[in-house]
């Protein structure tokens, strides 16, 4: 074999090697591109991410209605609900009051829906035989179960979109022929009491007392798919005088643990008909995937009425404010943080430029300059919990200078008695995992898990899938996922391949010149 044959064979070998490496590189780049496309599609279709819009400092206009007006509508409803939802009726309950069958101890998770920008958290229950499905507000601040009756018309406060209970279609429904009425500030519900089978998650209660309402004034909103309220407070405050469904399950000893757990998801978007995944409610225990560490349980302050626990301290900017140690009602059915006028005046005295709104739409609310940056934390027992700035500052109310806060003044009850003067609603609860324990009676809090997306996939009606992520949360998730996929073809690996090709070509050139 002469020198020219050797050079020719070397040239062919090097050329084939270059082609093989080039093909491998092209496949790797194509695979990387496909991987990115798949990741973008997955992220854009995740129901827990879509339609959850972080409110920016510049609020827009939708349908000719400014978001300031929408915030006003939201604020009025939230304030009326907070101001008037607590009643005086107290009664005791014993096991002799119950007539439900015993079942195997279980635990069950329910997906919640967040409606009207954290104002309402609903879950699905079924009533009757065959079962009829309803979305109801999960409310630890009341103790009655009521739903809109099929006789409720638009004139009586039931929008056409509301799913109504057809008592005539349930073979297990029994009319108690007793009136039922609850007043909620500017609204009220009225109807009759009856009993039927009620299912919550995996659990079923027979003979559960239900208010079937043909009058529902200023309570249900069109487009939010909400039919009523499931009270999760104690029997002592039930207007109907009945035992709440959750307490029946506890008394039957069918729960794996005598606990209800809540992880509420945040949605900041003042669109009146917006709904989105709202978190998880667990009956019969807690969902350990949704929190880290141990639950800090605080014994109830008083008898079994509201879920009342003592507030150990409150700090503003790291400085403790002298407000004593008041009893606080922990309430999943309330949006705001409510407190007496004197206490709020003390709290906001350390925030420059803060102001109490004494007239108009936002009467009773405290405002702060929109540029205010302050950390507020509350302490229960020995543990402190911060309130996210987005849960404290609700948005602009005028001219871009004043912003509404989630702190609202509760007018002292004229009747006194057991009515709470402090209420912590979703503005606080979105920052913790909350556990309501029947035995020993207590409320517990834990740090929410930050490493997983804990919320079940619940379709959001106004969702728009897109690969253009603008919120901080979306961009963070996108970045972390992409960086994890870069092990397929890192820049250093590309440089190594290109460098190798150059070296081979140089070697080939040298061989040809030999």
Image: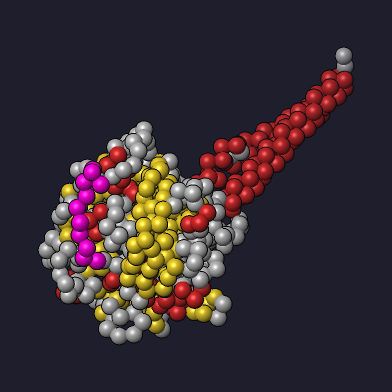
Residue at 54 percent across and 57 percent down: it is: 460
Please say if 472 is above or below 15.
below
Question: What's drawn in magenta, residue-wise?
Answer: 87-97
Give the image location of residue 344, x and y in percent.
Answer: 20, 72
Please say if 102 is above or below 157.
above
Give the image location of residue 240, x and y in percent.
Answer: 30, 60
Relative side of 76 to 467, left or right? left
- Choose between 282 and 339: the one closer to the eye: 282
Please say if 383 is above or below 388.
above
Quadrant for the N terminus in the image: top right
Residue farthest to the bottom? 359
Please say if 102 is above or below 448.
above
Majority secondary structure of magenta residues = loop
Residue at 40 percent across and 57 percent down: it is: 175
Give the image location of residue 211, x and y in percent.
Answer: 38, 60
- Choose between 69 and 171: the one closer to the eye: 171
Relative side of 276 to 254, left or right? right
Residue at 32 percent across and 74 percent down: it is: 185
Relative side of 503 to 368, left or right? right
Assess whether residue 90 is covered by the magenta stretch: yes
Residue at 49 percent across and 79 percent down: it is: 66
- Choose between 96 and 390: the one closer to the eye: 96
Residue farthest to the top? 1
Quadrant for the C terminus in the image: top right
């Amino acid at each position: 074999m002469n020198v020219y044959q050797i050079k020719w064979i070397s040239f062919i070998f090097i050329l084939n090697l270059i082609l093989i490496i080039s093909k491998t590189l092209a496949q790797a780049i194509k695979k990387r591109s496909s991987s990115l496309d798949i990741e973008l599609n997955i992220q854009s279709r995740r129901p827990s991410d879509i339609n959850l819009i972080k409110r920016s400092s510049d609020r827009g206009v939708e349908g000719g209605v400014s978001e300031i007006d929408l915030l006003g509508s939201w604020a009025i409803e939230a304030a009326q609900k907070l101001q008037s939802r607590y009643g005086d009726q107290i009664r005791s309950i014993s096991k002799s009051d119950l007539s439900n069958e015993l079942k195997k101890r279980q635990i069950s998770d329910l997906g919640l829906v967040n409606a009207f920008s954290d104002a309402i958290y609903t879950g699905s229950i079924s009533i009757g035989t065959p079962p009829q499905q309803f979305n109801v507000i999960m409310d630890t601040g009341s103790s009655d179960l009521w739903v809109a009756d099929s006789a409720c018309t638009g004139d009586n406060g039931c929008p056409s979109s509301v799913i109504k209970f057809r008592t005539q279609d349930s073979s297990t429904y029994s009319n108690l022929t007793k009136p039922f009425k609850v007043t909620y500030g500017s609204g009220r519900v009225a109807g009759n009491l009856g009993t039927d089978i009620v299912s919550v998650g995996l659990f079923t209660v027979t003979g559960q007392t239900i208010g079937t309402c043909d009058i529902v004034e200023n309570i249900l909103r069109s487009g939010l798919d909400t039919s009523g309220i499931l009270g999760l407070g104690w029997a002592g405050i039930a207007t109907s005088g009945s035992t709440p469904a959750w307490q029946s399950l506890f008394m039957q000893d069918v729960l794996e643990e005598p606990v209800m757990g809540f992880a509420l998801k945040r949605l900041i978007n003042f669109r009146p008909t917006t709904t989105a995944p709202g978190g998880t409610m667990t009956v019969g225990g807690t969902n350990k995937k949704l929190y880290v560490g141990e639950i800090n349980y605080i014994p109830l302050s008083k008898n079994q009425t509201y879920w009342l626990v003592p507030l150990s301290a409150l700090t503003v900017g790291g400085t403790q404010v002298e407000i004593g140690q008041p009893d606080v009602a922990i309430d999943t059915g309330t949006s705001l943080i409510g407190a007496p006028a004197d206490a709020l005046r003390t709290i906001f005295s350390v925030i420059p430029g803060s102001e109490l709104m004494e007239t108009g739409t936002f009467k009773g609310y405290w405002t702060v300059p929109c540029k205010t940056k302050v950390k507020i934390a509350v302490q229960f027992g020995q543990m402190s919990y911060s309130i996210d700035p987005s849960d404290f500052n609700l948005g602009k109310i005028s001219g871009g200078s004043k912003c509404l806060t989630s702190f609202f003044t509760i007018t002292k009850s004229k009747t006194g008695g057991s009515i709470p003067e402090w209420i912590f609603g979703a503005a606080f609860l979105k920052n913790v995992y909350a556990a309501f324990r029947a035995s020993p009676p207590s409320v517990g809090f834990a740090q929410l898990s930050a490493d997983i997306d804990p919320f079940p996939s619940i379709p959001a009606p106004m969702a728009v899938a897109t690969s253009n992520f603008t919120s901080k949360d979306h961009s963070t998730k996108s970045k972390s996922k992409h960086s994890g996929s870069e092990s397929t073809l890192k820049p250093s690996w590309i440089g190594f391949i290109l460098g190798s090709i150059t070296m081979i070509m140089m070697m080939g050139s040298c061989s040809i010149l030999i």
